[in-house]
Image (cartoon, helix red, strand yellow):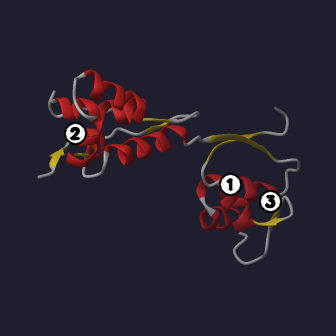
Amino acid sequence: MKLSTTIAATALTLATMTASANTVVFKPLDSAFETQACQIAGAQGLEAAKTFIVNQGESYRRFLVSVTCNGVSISTFAKMHKAAKEEKVQQVALVAKTNTVESQLCMDAVIMGEAQARAKHDVLEAPVLCNDKPLTKFVEKFAKADVVLKDSAE
């Protein structure tokens, strides 16, 4: 029989994007040994959880086959949260070298989206290049970045 331990790590994870990384807050539903092991795996990694399990006098092998953390193995759970911690948000400052409509369109498209920026600058159909790239590709490049627009005078 497989014991399924559910902690609020995945279901109630509070993931806050910051300039440097994702912050995950674990909120356990109870203080059971299995819950504690899952919480440690998510917060500190698999090795820390393994040490905790062994230090509690339990068999790590038994734990692997009989316990799940939010429906997945403890090793998968630890990997999922390790990847979330390592995901970085790139911070980028964009500066328009010229004050043309096209330059402003490129900058605004990154912040508000291509369609809205085209409408704002009344450039609905014409192809626009931003740093020698089509507008769509330019916008995609910065889709996962924390973008700050700066004036060329700054």
Location of the C terminus (image quadrant)? top right
- Residue 28: in sight, yes or no? no
What residue do we see at 35% from left, 26% from top? 51
Please report contact status of discs 2 and 3: CB closer than 8 Å, yes or no.
Answer: no
Vertical relation: 63 (above or below) 122: above
x then y, percent, for residue 76: 38, 48
Q: Residues within 10 Å of mark 3 (few under 14, many from 20)?
A: few
At which x and y percent is residue 6?
Answer: 19, 43
Picture quadrant where residue 7 is located: top left
Of labels 2 and 1, the one closer to you: 2
Bin the neighbour count of mark 2 within 10 Å (Cα to Cα): few under 14, some 14-19, many 20 and up. many
Say which residue appears at 18% left-offset and 29% top-offset: 33
118 relative position to 97: left or right: left
Identify the residue at the far left of this view: 1
Picture quadrant where residue 140 is located: bottom right
**Where does label 2 land, which residue?**
7
Towards the viewer: 77 or 130:
77
For the residues labelled 3 and 1, the Cα–Cα distance comes to 10 Å
Q: Secondary structure at mark 1?
A: helix
17 lies above or below 111: above
**Three-letter residue code for mark 1:** Asp
Q: Which mark is residue 108?
A: 1
Q: Earlier in the sequence, mark 2 or mark 1?
A: 2
- Per the image, the residue denoted by label 3 is 101
Residue 56 drawn at (x, y percent): 23, 23
Q: Amino acid at mark 3?
A: Val
